[in-house]
Image (cartoon, rainbow, N blue to C red):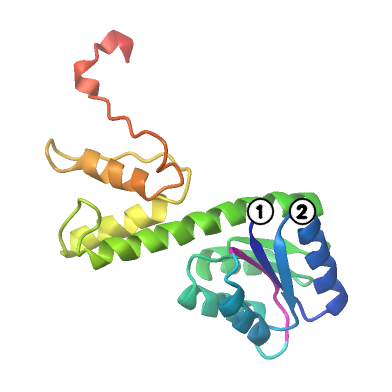
Amino acid sequence: MAKGRVLIVDDEPAAAEGLRELMAAWGYETVAEADGMAGLKRAEEFLPSVVVTDVLMPRLDGFGLLRELRKRFPEIAVILLTGQGSVEMALRAIQEEGAYHYFEKPIDMRKLRIVVERAVEYGEARRENEALRRQLRDRGAFGELVGSSEPMRQIYALIEQVAPSSASVLITGESGTGKELVARTIHNLSMRKNAPFVAINCSAIPETLM
């Protein structure tokens, strides 16, 4: 069984085919396209977890493809490759455009393998999260959380942002404001949703045991 689906987009046929064969050897179901427009069309049909794309391409370059994918398929993790990189371009790719990762050629294949593996996990978690979010939205509530005010929308956005990650989250607030409910919602939207959610009342634990 394949580990996940990866779409390669590169206008250099040898490079695209080489990456496709490498990803296949790593256990991924992989296809390749020669430019951004073809890559976007294939993404609609193939529904990959990860897209690995060159930056400089005809018709639709890597940044253009990234923007279109983020609009249409925000759950897909996009990894950019370039032979003419800079610190500024890397920062733009990740901080401004929302790329999952950025590599300069020649690529360290060992690092690429690690990043692709993590990106597939991230993409699958985002896909499951998006599906669950749609279900919750259709029900008219974000799980057990309710409300449509601007502060609540900000809370929903933060929950969506942190739930797919492995980051530690500190939730603060007055007693009775729903801290445990927020924590439970994050858990239910995360990759750990099948594991137990354990709530501990720290105020009931002696200070010497904390």
Mark 1: which amino acid? Lys
For this orientation, the residue located farthest to the top is 208
Q: Which mark is residue 3?
A: 1
Report if residue 107 is visible in the image.
Answer: no
Answer with left or right where residue 103 lies relative to residue 121. right
Which residue occupies the foreground of this view, 23 or 209? 23
Q: Residue at x 71, y 84 (%)?
A: 35
Quote the CA–CA distance across marks 1 and 2.
8 Å
* 174 to the left or right of 47: left
Position in image of residue 62 (x %, y %)? 65, 77
User: Is disc 1 in contact with disc 2, using a CB cutoff of under 8 Å?
Assistant: yes
Q: Which of disc 2 and disc 1 is earlier in sequence?
A: 1
Query: Furthest residue to the bottom?
Result: 59
Q: Residue at x 61, y 50 (%)?
A: 118
User: Going 49% across and 65% down the picture, which residue do you hit?
Assistant: 75
User: In this rendering, would 195 be left or right of 59?
Assistant: left
- Residue at image mark 2: 26
Name the foreground residue: 150 vs 77: 77
Give the extent of the magenta segment: 49-57
Query: Where is residue 26 drawn, in percent x and y?
Result: 77, 53
Three-letter residue code for mark 2: Trp
